[in-house]
Amino acid sequence: MARENKSKYAIMGILTWGSMSGYDIKKEIEQSVNYFWHESYGQIYPILKRLVAEGLATKSVEEQVGKPDRYVYTLTDKGKEELRQWLTEPADHPIERIELLLKLFFGREISAADNITHVKHFQEFQQKLLQEYRAIEQKLQHQHCNDPDYPYCMATLRYGLYTSQALLNWCDETLAMLHKIAESTQN
């Protein structure tokens, strides 16, 4: 059975915030769900075309002076109902493709120092990500705490915070193990 493309629901969810162009949708994704859900223009525009064809969204044209026309999409009542139905269904549990783990799994084939370098790069990335999450948390707490979407935004943000912190703990543990391996091979 073919896997359903969930990208359509991400776009439909963004459209619940109001009518938008494909460019606006991409911008909103980058400023909201981008830490855990990515969409490219190459995905967005075909999905918008399909949503219109299925009656889940409408498309209107806004004429602009000195610029090309702007196509704006609006979620229909049918689209809102389909999104709500999908939101009530259990979430899939996908298998992640994590290159670092693949490299570590076969890490015996390279030096411990090379593996340490890989983990340190990952650790630096997670530290930066954790800082970003904390900055977003501060912004949300000060600017959006009365927004009805606030608790839901915070739930997804806390997931990121906890995940990054857990991965930093994993980095510390893994680096300690790799340093022991490096020491044992030097003796």
Image (cartoon, grey):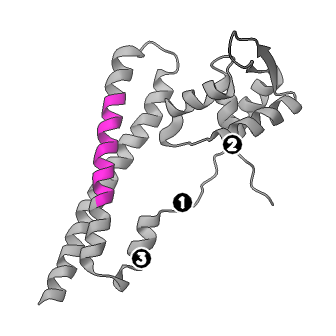
Q: Nearer the viewer, residue 82 or 8?
A: 8
Residue 42 at x, y percent in the picture: 68, 42
Give the residue pinned by disc 1.
96
Q: Which residue is mark 3?
A: 105
Give the quarter of the figure containing the C terminus: bottom left
Frontmost of labels 1 and 2 is: 2
Tell me the number on the disc at residue 42: 2
Task: Say which amino acid is labelled 1.
Answer: Glu
Name the residue: 50% across, 28% down: 152
| First along the sequence among labels 1 and 2 | 2
Q: Main secondary structure of the magenta part?
A: helix
**How far apart are the two marked residues, 1 and 2, measured between alpha carbons?**
22 Å
Which residues are the magenta region? 121-136
Amino acid of disc 3: Phe
Q: Residue furthest front?
A: 66
Q: Amino acid at mark 2?
A: Gly
- Furthest toward the left, the residue is 187
